Image (tube, coloured by chain):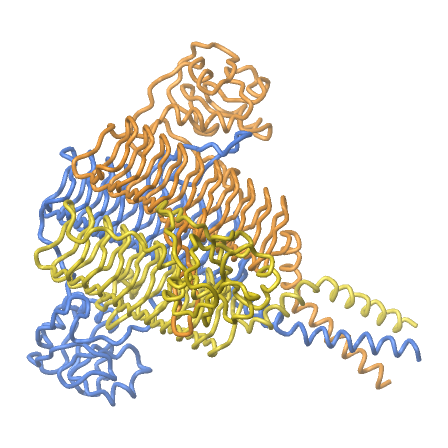
Chain colours: A yellow, B blue, C orange
Amino acid sequence: VKASKRKTPVPRSRSARDGSPVRSFTLAEAARAVSGRVAGPAGLRLTGLESLERAGPKDLSWIADSGRAEQAAASRAGAFFVSDASAAGGRPSIVVANPTVAVAIWLAHLHPPHRPAPGISRGAHVDPGARLGTGVSVAAGATIESGARVGAGTVVGAGAYVGRNAEIGENCRLFPLAAVLEGCRIGARCVLHSGAIVGSDGFGYVWDGTAHRKIPQLGIVRVEEDVEIGANAAIDRATFGETVIGRGTKIDNLVQVGHNVVVGEHALLCGQAGIGGSSRIGRGAVLAGQAGISDHAEVGDRATVTGQGGVVRGGIVPPGTVVSGMPTAPHREFLRRAAWVARLPELARRLDALEKNARSSEER
Amino acid sequence: VKASKRKTPVPRSRSARDGSPVRSFTLAEAARAVSGRVAGPAGLRLTGLESLERAGPKDLSWIADSGRAEQAAASRAGAFFVSDASAAGGRPSIVVANPTVAVAIWLAHLHPPHRPAPGISRGAHVDPGARLGTGVSVAAGATIESGARVGAGTVVGAGAYVGRNAEIGENCRLFPLAAVLEGCRIGARCVLHSGAIVGSDGFGYVWDGTAHRKIPQLGIVRVEEDVEIGANAAIDRATFGETVIGRGTKIDNLVQVGHNVVVGEHALLCGQAGIGGSSRIGRGAVLAGQAGISDHAEVGDRATVTGQGGVVRGGIVPPGTVVSGMPTAPHREFLRRAAWVARLPELARRLDALEKNARSSEER
Amino acid sequence: VKASKRKTPVPRSRSARDGSPVRSFTLAEAARAVSGRVAGPAGLRLTGLESLERAGPKDLSWIADSGRAEQAAASRAGAFFVSDASAAGGRPSIVVANPTVAVAIWLAHLHPPHRPAPGISRGAHVDPGARLGTGVSVAAGATIESGARVGAGTVVGAGAYVGRNAEIGENCRLFPLAAVLEGCRIGARCVLHSGAIVGSDGFGYVWDGTAHRKIPQLGIVRVEEDVEIGANAAIDRATFGETVIGRGTKIDNLVQVGHNVVVGEHALLCGQAGIGGSSRIGRGAVLAGQAGISDHAEVGDRATVTGQGGVVRGGIVPPGTVVSGMPTAPHREFLRRAAWVARLPELARRLDALEKNARSSEER
């Protein structure tokens, strides 16, 4: 369920994304980048990062945990990220707290994302009343409206949109066709993937006897720093005040966040999850794929709603728990119930037998 | 479930969206705007609209229903929208049929949405063969193709798209990056939020022995007046004829409407709901979040499918009913079944006990 | 469930999409287009294609299968597509292997989609380092980045995006606001509907003790030929290597495909279906609307997951099977269980009666 628990797939020494080859590096250089300690020849020269199974003598690899001892011994890798020097069996290694984290850091070091040149492209539409920090890059077809502020180093991709009085922090990335609408605020180092919409109107109406009359949506969305928002996700502005996405939270593709929702820090909202109006999602909570949280509900800190789980209106998921099903139940209970439901034909047969037995004993 | 039943959140005297302060107003002025009757000093000057709990002496507030009598008595508000003059306990008030409706009207009056200046922006792409009504505003990066007609007063946002021969009514709003594709028709006063796509091809193929062969999608989408379509929603064109969205219907973010669907008037399709091809959704029906209606199904007038409910292919939801679950059952029945499933371990234990008892009586 | 099994709705002799009238044609001309055999007067002149019920003497119609014999006899159609000459009862007809396929072919022949003129529109943003084949059309507001290659005859719609080093095959169509991001590859004759995003980052993070650290997503998406991707769908790039969409696969609106997923050839992914990271979807498999496939799961060749079905992490759906529910079970088993759950109150009553009976016999 947890995205962060996904197995890291097999790397290649060459980025498929941009076709760039990986330059060679020394063990010492890699250790420095990941704040690790070299165990072995610091000057050892390597050229790629590969899984234990695929690595050759010129590749760095990693031993994620002690359960990988056998594969590690069999691996042809030239060196390893390890959490314990002994894990590498005396072969060259870099000792770090968490080898998988080291892989993430080292990959980011080897393959920095392409960064377009700073400046406003011909074909970009930047209102004279917008304020852009130093080093901002605005691509063709992008629009930045009056009163908007874009922090230093931020990249605004082709066709992306920054509305009136919106504020984008430093070193953000708006991928092509992402949009931040009027008055919304995005913290530093956020990433908005293509088609992500921040600040659409909340779904608020009141029946006036003949029609659904719109309740003006006057609030904003405030996205704190280090948040990532997936492709074609939609985050609604608050009716009043703020819809909030907490610091470090990661939102996957096609996720819906309703008006006045508050998502805590470091939450994970997986693909196609949806959150109704005014609900609260706790710090470190996880909504797995297609999970649905109704209006005015609460998912506690570090709680998990598993895939397709449905929390009803006003429902509460206690902190730290894992819940499943619609309506949700504790995950183990959900599994037990599913198992019992599968046994219903058998239970019914036993009931038939007992009834038959009872009838025949009465006849006796 | 019903979006229109959501509690109205706490307002502020200042719009977060555009930062504009609220100008002061008299009781008489507010009463006139909402077609209400003043009970008290018509010249009383106020500056904001706040909930009972937050309002101060300069704020207008509202008493939504008689259940709010206690909070109303305790409120420091300067005046109230009420449905019954006595509810305000003799304090200044404006008597209206529905105080929540009055709030919606008065907020729209206080905070009209920002309207860009009429005209075609530099950087907009308007085909000479398109016809634009008076006062139309077309933002940079927007495209309007040949043969398209855009009604007077309509706003076409940045990067939005109006296809060949499409027709947009008067006083519509296409938010940035919304799209109305070839030949589709949008009625007056409709709102399309960012990323909403009207007129994508229906999902129709026929297996020809070696491949899924596309059935050309030759129809259109016809959206009647006063419809709102949420961010990143997708409404498919009909194979032939029309996919129809009825007058006054409100569609939330990320909703999917398949080809040849007909949605009645004043329906509510909540976030991430989906409707398969050729289904009919009745007048005033509600699809709650993530509800799924399969192909060729029918949801009756004023019926509700609750969150994540699934109506199977060809299924029928009778008018006025509330259904839940997958496959759907009447909501109460769904709750009863869920309660029984939760009791399955207990039922199984009782069955065990009866069997044991039966065995021992046979042995006797 | 199968999109390809949807009834073909009623056609019109005029395309609603572009308002173009249908020119007249002879029986021979239609037979030639669909590789059929004329049975009757080859020179018979017709003007439209209509269903059996709606067709008049100037219309061609079709008899989908032998179950339609009665309607066929009653139809006023001037001629028919048939699979067996006798089906038309001696009236003029065109004999083909599959009449519905003939309808699809003939409609495509009668109503070719509008094709904008080749060339780069004023207002398009094409990097000098991009390579465009002959006859490519690029609309206003579209962007094609450096190193991108676009095959001959491909149409890039308004506001669409082709990223650095991306490759688009021949005769593709990118509808307005579709995006193919850096390095991704699209095969020949693919269609990307508006808002479809190919190549957004996979959702991969590792918890580093204080934050979710991003695992760089260095791979690409490879879409093979003849694939169609629906409006506002999102296909993530692989962490390393490739996310693959197999040849001839059709993807509906708002579908999510996670990183490193491999979808086989000729699969159908219906509206709002979602696939977690590293899962495999077999050749010819069908995911019905809102079906969810968790991470590292496997759906076998020609298997079907019905609407809202949920395959758990690592789950396996055997080839050729039909599964339903969350967690999934064989479809018949799912229906049986649902029926038993509906009977739970009755089972409980019978259990009560047996217990009462047991108590009273003990008292005796």
Instruction: Answer whether residue A258 is visible to the viewer in this image.
Output: yes
The answer to whether A253 is drawn above or below residue B236 in the figure is: below
> Where does residue C156 sit, x and y in percent of width and height?
29, 37
Residue B180 position, x and y percent, is: 27, 44
Query: Can residue C272 be seen?
Result: no
Tell me the quadrant of the picture where the C terminus of chain B can be found: bottom right
- Image vertical order of residue A170 relative to residue C175, above or below: below
Please report the residue visible at 49 percent of the width from the left and 50 percent of the height from the top.
C261
Q: Percent from the top left, x then y, of residue A102?
A: 43, 65
* Residue nearest the observer in this picture, B185 or C211: C211
Residue at image point 15% right, 77% down = B48
Q: Is residue B308 above or below residue B239?
A: below
Left or right relative to C95: residue C189? left
Give the residue furthest to the left.
B43
* Drawn side of residue A118 relative to residue B210, left or right: left
Q: Quadrant of the N terminus of chain B?
A: bottom left
